[in-house]
Amino acid sequence: MSNYHLAEINIAKMKGVDINDPIMKEFVDNLDAVNTLAEESEGFVWRLKDETDNATSLNPYNDEQIIINVSVWENIETLEHYMYKTFHSDFLRRRKEWFQKFGKAHTAMWWIPKGHIPTLEEAVEKLDYLQKNGPSELVFDLRTKFPAPKQIA
């Protein structure tokens, strides 16, 4: 049993001028369903949300076109199952309809002690570190994964 959970942040730059742009309508209309699916998925621990139950109003980059998601999972396997083996995968496949090519790393993952909830600032710093330095045991991406730290006896 691990003493660690997996935290992740992902960001996307919308094709719309903001979340209310008509081009974003289908994506927005399904946000609650996708978020509920995450919360009901095996291995889900926590997700960042505001008073509207999602994170679309949070704007750490001061850019109305960028939306973020921060969540915590028991491990990489449960996160990947949610991403690729559920209704969420339809939205991954169709992301070009709503989002621009970002160019640099848009997903960062890192191990946190069980019970720790990452702040938005911490998540943004982790993504920034990954974009500047590439994947390592400190922060990594979906292509280059690192196992949870070893247990201390």
Image (cartoon, helix red, strand yellow):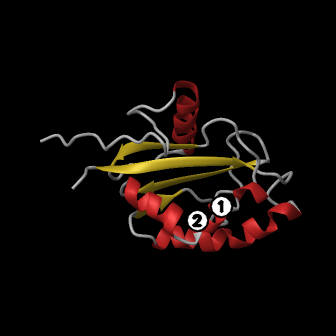
Percent coordinates x, y for residue 149 in the rendering: 28, 40
The answer to which of 122 and 15 lies nearer the viewer is 15
Q: Is residue 132 above or below residue 31?
A: above
Is 22 situated left or right of 64 in this image? right
Residue 114 horizontal/vertical position (percent): 32, 51
Please provide percent x and percent y for residue 39.
49, 69
Residue drawn at 59 percent across, 59 percent down: 49
Secondary structure at numbered mark 2: helix
Using the numbered discs, state the Cα–Cα distance from disc 1 to disc 2 in whole angstroms.
Answer: 6 Å
The amino acid marked with disc number 2 is Ser
For the C terminus, which image quadrant?
top left
- Tell me: 32 left or right of 46: right
Q: Does the image show residue 102?
A: yes
The residue that disc 2 covers is 89
Q: Specify whether residue 117 is in view.
A: no
Mark 1 belongs to which amino acid?
Arg
Dot 1 lies on which element? Answer: helix
Q: Which residue is drawn at 53% across and 70% down?
A: 86
Vertical side of 35 occupied by 79: above or below:
above
Q: Residue 119 at what x, y percent from top left?
A: 51, 45
Q: Which residue is drawn at 71% across and 55% down?
A: 57
For the point 40% across and 53% down, which residue is it?
76
Would you say the residues marked 1 and 2 are in contact, meaning their CB atoms lie under 8 Å apart? yes
Q: How many marks?
A: 2
The one of 115 and 82 positioned closer to us in this rendering: 82
Residue 28 lies left or right of residue 128; in this view the side is right
Q: What number is the disc on residue 93?
A: 1
Front residue of 128/58: it is: 128
